[in-house]
Image: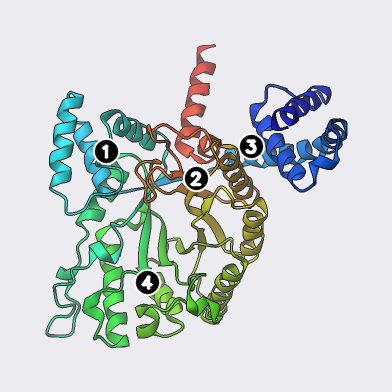
Amino acid sequence: MKKQIKEFIIEVIKNLNYDPNDLELQKYLLEKGIKALNKINTENYSIEQIKKLIYDNVPTMIKEYLRMQQAITNKSLKKTNFGTSINYQLVELFKILNCVSSENEFNIMKNQYLQSQPTIFPGLQKSTYEEIKNIYKNIIENCDVITPEVEAKMTLTINNSMTPFNNDGSVNTKIFNFSYLDIIINFAKQNNMKVRLHTLIWHKHFPKILANCSKDQIITFLYSYFSYIANRYDTNIFYTIDVLNEIVANINSEEFKQGNVLRNSKWKEKLGNDYYITILKLARQNFPNSNLTYNEYDETNKQKRDKMISIINDIKQEETKTDTILLDSIGLQSHYHEYTTDEEIKATYTDLSQTRKNLQVSEMDITKINNPNDIQINRVFRTVLDCAATYNIDSFTCWGPSSSISWKSKKVRTFLNNNGEIDSNCMQIVETYSQKRKNKNLNYQENLHSLK
């Protein structure tokens, strides 16, 4: 039946005078056709009746496809940013790549380096010379923004074996360790990229050394911590700062089921139920001109999204009272899977756009569960791109530089495939959002014109 549906669709496209070789249109219509037919009992329909259903509905589907493509085309003409997450060990492998003369030499030095590490990021141990070479090439040629995966999180930036305060009550800045983040920042500078600073506050990383500190002491500590970052780096390198990460209760938790908005965390316990406002104020004082973001996952869950919106509304009320913008953007992590529906994704953008805060795609990947082909993966990528373009999102970041070097190694589709090449399903996103790629194409076209 699927093969017949595809044949019918191609026949309709020809009769409607659209390009029958437009494979993206074919995939779109096939996916929509199958979805529509799954909703009816096809056993009660003859082939001719099914064919008539397709003929009757394809024109409407094509109209929607053309609207979507126009939105994407319009976005591709604007200044945008595309990025990926990265880790310091991968950057170190890039350095090795650029100083060796053979694959064998690379493998020897790679193994020596990784053996020196206390833990190794997923996928790096089995990575090959060709894979790393492809990843390096595609990152520097296509990424405008990179996101450190853990290097800016307190698990690496805070030394928990030292005292947080000096004898005079001032913060002991020797406790801060930004050597790992330096590796990411320097790589970004060398390759004309900005950095998404991820993340200042995360429930998983409450420093143990603050366990016995008072609320005032923790606020003093955080002010010093934020100030240290602002003074260490030129803050213009930060495209966005993820100030708050995953603060809403997890949808599977007891607090969520009980109707609580916030996740139970040490930050909430120590700083109070409005701690997110306290932290945003500290961030704004230290990063007055930066784009400050609240980053969240499971945003397609309506109940969780409503809790997110309630927090954002609280922040907006405080902004009105203090006449200060505390929050600029909302980061949609976009960790989806092949069964994430178009309706869930579109509702997410519709609802969150009504907060009037900028939206960003901050960590997109798609978990591949069962399907042997890519039709559902392609659908999710396409729907997200459609929403991102339609709702005027200017920053689009994928999580994990490749499917094999990822927190869900080889189980996800992201920016690059297992070979380090751009994933075919993600290609249109890269072409629409990568400013580097658009500038390169523009320069190429200008050079062609000058030769005429």
Earlier along the polypeptide chain: callout 1 or callout 3? Answer: 3
Residue 311 in view, yes or no:
yes
Q: Residue at x 15, y 28 (%)?
A: 105
Tag nearer the camera, 4 or 2: 2
- Looking at the image, which residue is at 49% across and 62% down? 297
Residue at disc 4, secondary structure: loop
Label ID, residue 203: 4
**Closer to the camera: disc 2 or disc 3?**
2
Asked whether the residues under the numbered discs 1 and 3 touch, taking CB atoms below 8 Å apart as contact, a structural biologist would say no
What amino acid type should be assigned to the residue bearing mark 4? His
Q: CA distance from mark 1 to mark 4?
A: 31 Å
Q: Which residue is mark 2?
A: 368
Type of amino acid at the residue the image marks with label 3:
Thr
Q: CB of mark 2 within 8 Å of CB of mark 1?
A: no
Q: Position of residue 143 (x, y in %)?
A: 41, 40
Q: Real-space Cα distance between discs 2 and 3?
A: 28 Å
**Residue 389 coordinates in the image, percent (x, y):** 62, 46
**SS at circle 3:** helix
Q: Which mark is residue 73?
A: 3
Q: Are marks 2 and 3 in contact (CB under 8 Å)?
A: no
- Residue 128 horizontal/vertical position (percent): 27, 32
Q: Marks 1 and 3, how far apart in space?
A: 38 Å
Q: Amino acid at mark 2?
A: Lys
Dot 1 lies on which element?
loop
Disc 1 target residue: 126
Q: What quarter of the picture does the N terminus occupy?
A: top right
Among the two numbered marks 4 and 3 on one chain, the one whose residue lies closer to the N terminus:
3
Q: Amino acid at mark 1?
A: Lys
The numbered mark, 2 or 1, whose residue comes first in the sequence reads: 1
Q: Is residue 432 left or right of residue 216?
A: right
